Image (spheres, rainbow, N blue to C red):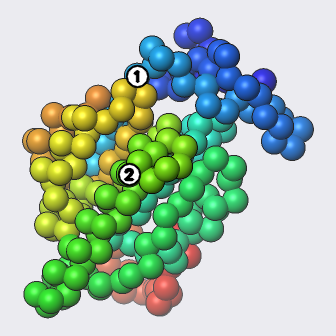
Amino acid sequence: VLCGYDKGQGEAPYLSCEGAVPQETGEIKVCRGGRGMNETGLVQIYCGDGKGKTTAAIGAAVRAAGRGYRVLVARLLKTDDSGEVNGLVHIPGITVLPCDRNFGFSWNMTQSQRKAAALYYEHCFLTAWNMALGADGGEPYDMLVLDEAIGACNLGFVDEAGLVKALKEKPAALEVILTGRCPSEALRDQADYITEMVMRRHPYAVSYTHLTLPTTSRV
């Protein structure tokens, strides 16, 4: 039986799932619904100008699902044409909400496009939050990943005050992960973990005058 934090031998915040009911997943038994009354879900922020913010969040989601937790992933400022989406949808325990509208780069948006983007992304955030809490009538989730929520707040597409209030009032057992550059002090104050990715080198910062670069990336 795979459990989370086994009496101090694992890594927080995946705590003991003693008393959980094992469910068969192939040949592996995974504990489902094992969050205890004394368990505390934390708030994590992955920020900075370096690569790896979403990668870290997705890694945490996969590890949580592997321990039997229910994970909800909401992606903002992105589309579903991304490699992690195709992978995550095949992992039991992980639900990925669709992000099916593309408004282009923020600096190219018209005022009407910015207004439409704000309405859409605020709706995405509220939908994800309500689902995570089980307010839609479904089973609550153990972890909520809000990918690029910080960027959406910085652009005014998600109400930051509403996000801060939600973090302050979240259920004690819910783990929340936020990603994006330049989190505000108000968001940082809500975090238990803050990990900053720093760019030391990046191919886009180098002039490849002797190479013909592909027009699309597979990364």
Q: Position of residue 213 (x, y in %)?
A: 46, 86
Is 165 or 202 nearer to us in this picture? 165
Q: Position of residue 200 (x, y in %)?
A: 30, 53
Amino acid type, mark 1:
Thr
In the displayed structure, 158 sits above or below 140; it is below
Q: Check disc 2 and report the residue beneath it.
A: 130
Judging from the image, what secondary structure is the residue with disc 2 in?
helix
Find the distance from the CA under tag 1 to the CA under tag 2. 19 Å
In the rendered image, is residue 52 in sight? no
In the rendered image, is residue 82 in sight? yes
Residue at the image position 53 percent from the left and 49 percent from the top: 138
Residue at the image position 24 percent from the left and 55 percent from the top: 150
* Disc assigned to residue 118: none
| Pointer 1 or 2: first along the chain | 1
Q: Is residue 91 left or right of residue 201?
A: right
In the displayed structure, 36 sits above or below 27; it is above
Label 2 neighbour load within 10 Å: few <14, some 14-19, many 20+? some
Residue found at the far right of this picture? 27
Quarter that holds the N terminus: top right
In the displayed structure, 124 sits above or below 208; it is above
Q: Check disc 1 and report the residue beneath it.
A: 40
Q: Is residue 12 left or right of residue 31?
A: left
